[in-house]
Amino acid sequence: MKIDNKGFVTSIILFSLLILFLVVFFTLLITIDGSSKINTIIKKDIQGKLENSSTSVLQKVWIFEYTGAEEVFKVPENGIYKLETWGAQGGSFNTTYIGGLGGYSKGEIKLNEGETLYINVGGKGSSYSKTTISLGGYNGGGDGGVNSVSSSMQGGCGGGGATHIATESGLLSSLSKYAGDNNSPILIVAGGGGGPASLNETDNAYIVQGENGSGGGIKGASGGYASTYPSYYATGATQTSGGNDNAEASETSKGTFGKGGSAFTSFGGNGGGGGYYGGGGSSRFHSGAGGGSGYIENSRLLNSLTQNGVREGNGYVKITYLGN
């Protein structure tokens, strides 16, 4: 049998070209698909979650939520970053009498690659208790009181903790040596809210809440009070001093740097919010505690702002890379 060598060679060449075409085609498909997937991957920082899925250098956002412990952010590259902090809410008696809301502070800052920021996100204050101390939230919330002399509902709620960012490790209260120093490692603070003024359903009175001990702002808000006891409330913190109980001031109820005052009488009371300075603790169940103050005066901050009473629940931090 005679073999047509020319036809055989032609078939081999055509078959080889077909195989080459298929290899190139599928390689392109895999490359395009892989590139698409890479561009949609949500990158994660070790301590913070990247909120924005874009890989653009100008849109990096890290989120830090409450953990009850210090968190760390390593600056990934030189540039301008926006720091946003929210303080924690004070504990609540019920859905009618809720703790003061945490404050909000923001500012922009130039950071260098490799610089370390230490972040402490405030915890919400413990809810009402009559028989056990209602602990204040993480990072400076004051403790609520216990009723030991009356059969009434007088007890207390814990204050909300502050949220702060610093270039030195530690709870805010541990950095008290830097009080008033605007070149210190403390970059920014959002104040926590105080425990609320509350009443029983059988009480022949009503609550004047006012700003309800909200935290944050240049000055934390004072707590609410019962209409029958208008002098029983605690004051909010300022930039230079803590709040205190208005009716029965004491060293225990006085807010200090980084920490809210605590209830101190046998008639219960509410814990003050943590902050740059802490809000005052109160001496009665119907006496609202004060909110902690925010802080935005660090010399490294630009375009800064602080305000009272915007955050429910635990605190929160958001860091955004804005570019060079």
Image: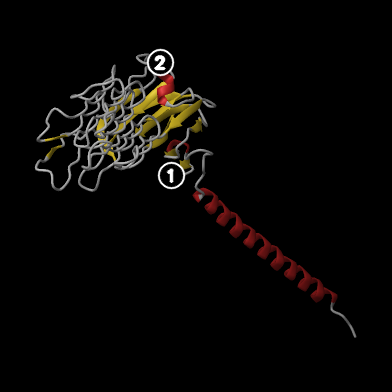
Which corner quadrant of the image does residue 296 belong to? Answer: top left
Amino acid beneath label 1: Asn
Which of the image's four quarters has the C terminus? top left
Tell me which colouring the rendered structure shows: secondary structure
Q: Position of residue 45 (x, y in %)?
A: 52, 39
The one nearer the camera, 308 or 231, is 231
Q: Position of residue 94 (x, y in %)?
A: 24, 47
Return the residue at label 1.
52
Amino acid beneath label 2: Tyr
The one nearer the camera, 123 or 10, is 123
Q: Is residue 128 left or right of residue 163?
A: left
Q: Secondary structure at mark 1?
A: loop
Counting residues from the N terminus, which is met first, the one under dot 1 or under dot 2?
1
Number of marks in picture = 2
Which residue is at 51% across, 43% downward? 44
As drawn, 286 above or below 108: below
Q: Position of residue 17 (x, y in %)?
A: 71, 65
Find the residue positioned furthest to the bottom: 1
| Contact flag, marks 1 and 2 (Cβ < 8 Å) | no
Which residue is at 49% across, 25% downward? 169
Which corner quadrant of the image does residue 154 belong to? Answer: top left
Q: Nearer the viewer, mark 1 or mark 2?
A: 2
Q: Is residue 173 left or right of residue 281?
A: right
Say which mark, if any, is on residue 178: 2
Q: Secondary structure at mark 2?
A: helix
Q: Residues within 10 Å of mark 2 (few under 14, many from 20)?
A: few
Find the residue positioned furthest to the right: 1
Q: Is residue 170 left or right of residue 28?
A: left
Q: Position of residue 253 (x, y in %)?
A: 28, 25
Which of the image's four quarters has the N terminus? bottom right
The one nearer the camera, 264 or 23, is 264
